[in-house]
Amino acid sequence: MRNQIEFEVYGNYALFTDPLTKIGGEKFSLQIPTYQALKGIVESIYWKPTIIWYIDEVRVMNPIQTESKGIRPIEYSGGNTLAYYTYLKSPRYQVRAHFEFNPHRKDLIHDRNEHKHHNIAKRSVQAGGRRDIFLGTRECQAYVEACKYGEGEGDYDDIPEINFGVMVHGINYPDETGRNQLETRLWRAKMEYGKIDFIRPEECRMVRKTGEGIAKPFGNGNVQAVDQLYTELFGEEE
Amino acid sequence: MTWLANLHKTYEQHSQVIGQFEKKKNGREYALIPVSHTTQSAHIEVNVNSNGDFISAKVIDKSEGSTIIPCTEASASRTSAPVPHALFDKLVYVAGDFEAYCGEVKGTPYVDYMNQLSSWCESPSAHPKVNSVREYLAKGTLMTDLIDAHILWKDEYGQLLDKWNTATEALYGEKPGIFKVIPSDQSTAFVRFAVMIPGDPEPRLWRDTTVQNSFIQFNEMNMKEQELCYITGEYLPYADKHVSRIRNSGDKSKLISANDTSGFTFRGRFRTSREAAAVSYDVSQKAHNALKWLIERQGIPIDSKVFLVWGIDQLDIPAPFADTFTLYNDDEDEMVEAQSVGDRTHKEFANQIKRAIGGYRYDGDYKSDVIIMTLDAATPGRMSIVYYRDMNKELFLNRLENWHLTCVWLHRYRKDGDKYIQFTGAPATRDIAFAAYGPQAGDKLIKSLMERMLPSIIDGRPIPRDIVRSAVHRASSPVSMDHWEWEKTLSITCALVNKMYEKERFAVSLDINNSNRDYLFGRMLAIADVLERKALGKEEKRATNAVRYMNAFAQHPARTWNIIQSNLQPYQARSGTRDGFIIHCTRLLDKVGSQLQPKDYTDISLSGVYLLGYYSQRNDLYTSKADKELNDESEEKMNEQGENN
């Protein structure tokens, strides 16, 4: 696919919190990453408001195993408390993603240089991402490596189908939908021969409004053109 | 699927048993509870007729108290605030004359209760028998009737009696039943109703499915708010509160709780818990009720943890924590055969395991799933799923089979009545904990070990090294424990070590060609042990030198062997050349010793493998002794011949 990147992401633990267990405080991980979690990883590799990343596919490489840990989360009313968080153990995924220009970002139309963004993205994958990577939650530090998607043996390669039922797909933010509200998307996830084929966010039929918000505008006030920065830094030397 | 979806599916798969009580071995009853219902133990049963007249009442025996009661979302999770249940409840709610006997109460529980009951009776889903109960309770004479029927007791001031003591005993005679079933105050008694109608087979309202369905409908009508359900993906009536008392009746912790507005568990992105996640009432009720039922039925509670394994279609699944012997016994046909399991060939043993596990394989359910789930609560109030695994059933059974085939040794610690049973197979996880940590191991230690062993059993991962090391260490200190305990520790440790060195395929039967250093040292120790034991005779109970020095031997084999051997000499000398067995042992010792490479005869400490050599050699010497005794005469003759020459 056009503007695609492929990479492998792995870590010791992952916590893609099941929202049902989140409201009570004893976090429990979903069996597989959500679309949004992977999107977050790709955005940590490289992102600009000009583009929107789309996750095409993910391959689950290691067996899905859980392990719990006693955690002392901060009690905001004072002190701390004990909770058992349940993590996925040694997760490893191969991800395939591509970007498209954000149609709701008319303010950044001048930045729509496909070749530039794709090359930066590819270089960022080689470098292991621009920002630090984590799987689901911040304490689950992860690492990105460039890979050839589909290479190597996955634990579920021979299993025709595993159904995960209804799962969170992701969250719709105002700047990507053009609507001034926050929405949560659900979808029916299934894994075939170790691969999960994600549907696109706008294909999700189960969407509910979960809050309000507006897109942040970008303009002269908060964006600096690269040529201008270049002059500032090196202009005098020339 | 997600855990809640799997539980929901389990409920739907077993809807034919909803509301049916089953009895556990300890006499406790449990049932798959219908939606909008919960269980509570009732103390008093009141019979009325269809006109709403009091007929009789009785105190319910503790073992029969378990009652399925209709409840609303609010009443199911009531704490201190008075929220009435729909039909059966405590005296304070159902008795109109409560205040006359017990003084004033907070709020208006009776009025609230009657209002709720009336709206049920006036709704389209009303039930005539429930109406009879309403008519009776509207009279407000329940307490008076119960006192007249000698169910409740009042004191000299006309108030309800607080306590039954010696003074009241002198007044009224023997302690009445109500004080036997209620530990505290009579006024906390829980009441259930039966409506007697001539010709009606089921007067007990709590067992009447038509009453249950009538309430389910009524309750559904009251729920107006719909929300996108995160499990079914459909817009359905929304559950604001979820079921508690999951692990046991005293457990108030919830898997899904929604009252956290200060801990910042979801806030930041969402303002209310409903924005963060939503589950429909129906799914929440069904899934939680299924979970409670499964825990009652087949959960293993240890400390605060509950281990649960079930098949979605066929609930019964061989427990991964049980030993191989239990596995045989699950299958009743195998039971008789299992007694004789012991010194059989590995192939026969493997077949037996395959058959026992095969008993759980059903035609056509190869696509079915097995769920392994462990629950625990770190703090009261919030429960956590600390382990969750959703596995294909075939895969699960294959992995379990492999566990029983590879973590194997010959055990003699199981008792069937008074008799010790010998079986070959894998030890139970709980016994592994005792082997590794000693008999004083607390439940906290056991539960964490059980959780850590799970990946080894169901994923075929290596057993955590520290567990094996700890077991080997304990098995090497026979003098620190009773003989039976050491034997048990030894055979379990051998099973663990065997699993650890799975590739090398050690077997219980002695491998005389194995030239592994540790194995040979182990064999030498066994021969020394058996030799001395024999020389000491049956009366002498003291430990042999081999056993006494075992720990040191494991650390410094070469140095310690010199000590053991020099201590052996007197016995060898004393028995002289007459005792064929001792001569046999002495010769064997030389033979084994010669197999040991000179470069291996060092003080480098021994690995757990030496225990395998020890066990196998000892077992060989003891079991073949019977055969040997048969041949003893001929052997002695040969020896005599040898002397003559």
Image (cartoon, grey):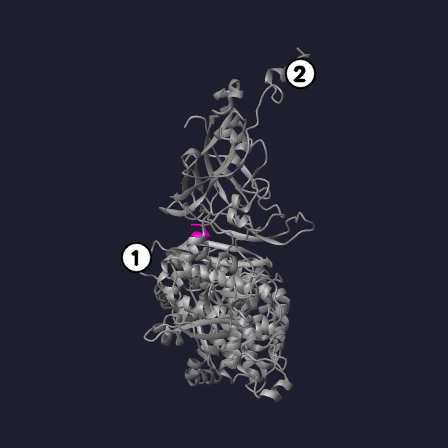
Q: Which residue is mark 1?
A: B364
Q: Chain of mark 1?
A: B
Q: Position of residue B120 (x, y in %)?
A: 43, 60
Classified by dominant secondary structure, the portion drawn in magenta counts as: helix
In-image side of A160 versus B483 (left or right)? left
Q: Nearer the viewer, residue B638 or A197?
A: A197
Residue B496 visible, this angle: yes
Q: What amino acid type should be assigned to the residue bearing mark 2? A: Glu
Dot 2: chain letter: A
Are dots 2 and 1 on a single chain?
no
Q: Is residue B524 left or right of residue B316?
A: right
x and y percent of residue A231 in the render?
64, 14
Numbered-mark total: 2
Where is residue B482 drawn, in percent x and y? Answer: 59, 77
Q: Secondary structure at mark 2?
A: helix
Q: Is residue B632 above or below residue B75?
A: below
Label 2 to label 1: alpha-carbon separation:
73 Å
- Mark 1: amino acid: Gly
Whether residue A153 appears in magenta in the rendering, the answer is: no
List x then y, in percent, for residue A26. Answer: 56, 52
Label 1: few (<14), some or many (≥20) within 10 Å? few
Q: What is the span of residues highlighted in magenta in the rendered image?
A: B1-7
Q: Is residue A9 above or below residue B446?
A: above
Label annotation for residue A232: 2
SS under mark 1: loop
Q: Is residue B3 magenta?
A: yes
Residue at horizontal 59 percent and vertical 46 percent from the top: B265
Q: Residues within 10 Å of mark 2 (few under 14, many from 20)?
A: few
